[in-house]
Amino acid sequence: MSDYIFIRRSRNLLSTIIHAVLNLMLAIASILATVITGNFGIGLVLVFISKWRVFAVNHRYWLLNLRANLVDFIVGTSFVLLAYATGTSDLQPAHYVLMAGYAIWLIAIKPRSSAFFTTIQAVFATLLGATAAAILTANFDAAVLVLSCFLIGFAAIHHIVIQNNDEDYLFISSIGGLIYAEIAWMAHSWLIIYTINDTGICLSQLGIILSVLTFAFYKIYSYASEHRHKIRFTEVALPIIFSVAVIAVLVIGFSQPRFNIY
């Protein structure tokens, strides 16, 4: 029996190592392929191929699997699109940061299922997705950004709500998506990008604002779920005040057309 347990643990350890190595290769290959080819198509193909198990079931479950994996799709797609937006002439410091960030997501963040990591995953997808959308759709019609942020908001809220098996998860997620889309519509005419020196690393003001709202929603929804959807303002005042304060500081103090972080 002890030999069997040892063999089983060894196989589990080996499979974990192989899985981590494959994820690391995906993170590097998707970003590197985008930079080398000057086209984000190959990087996106690699991201979608890595999710083959979403479609390796009866077609009746495809929509369900897509919703369940929407956050992961958004994160992977955002990393590739941000790598493309950073530049494809040669490797920049931002490309290495994106590789490392994607690897951390795949190996350390995505596999976790606790309430804390579920929130981190939702916030991560919101920040990256909205930043990529703001950068790449700046010269397009506002509808493109609005639709993108609706999808991001739907995915982030759905990712949080579904953990509690709420029967109204589709309705709540759709309302969240509509709110994010409305904010994106208002922000489209004045998109602010924060950059860090000449590294190419950047974040959008829209992404930060929506991420703060995602976190605030998690805190309020968690409290409501624990108290049968009854909310006392005094109990949720702190996340609301924090969110309003952060958004106010960003909008009032850091809304120059281009703000650099030194």
Image (cartoon, helix red, strand yellow):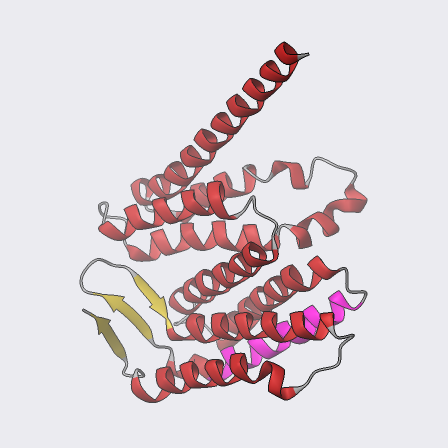
- Say above or below: 18 vs 163: above
Which residue lies at the image location 30% right of the left edge and 86% below the top edge? 253
Q: In the rendered structure, which segment of residues is drawn in magenta?
A: 168-186
- Say above or below: 70 vs 59: below
Residue 122 is drawn in which quadrant? Answer: bottom right
Question: Which one is in front, 107 or 202?
Answer: 107
Where residue 23 appears, as percent x and y from the top left, is: 46, 35
Q: Magenta span has 242? A: no
Which residue lies at the image location 53% right of the left edge and 79% below the top edge? 239
Where residue 196 appears, as percent x and y from the top left, is: 23, 65
Q: Quadrant of the N terminus?
A: top right
Question: Which one is in front, 141 or 159?
Answer: 159
Where residue 84 appears, as percent x and y from the top left, is: 35, 52
Magenta part mainly helix, strand or loop? helix
Where residue 167 appears, as percent x and y from the top left, is: 81, 65
Q: Quadrant of the C terminus?
A: bottom left
Q: Magenta span has 185? A: yes
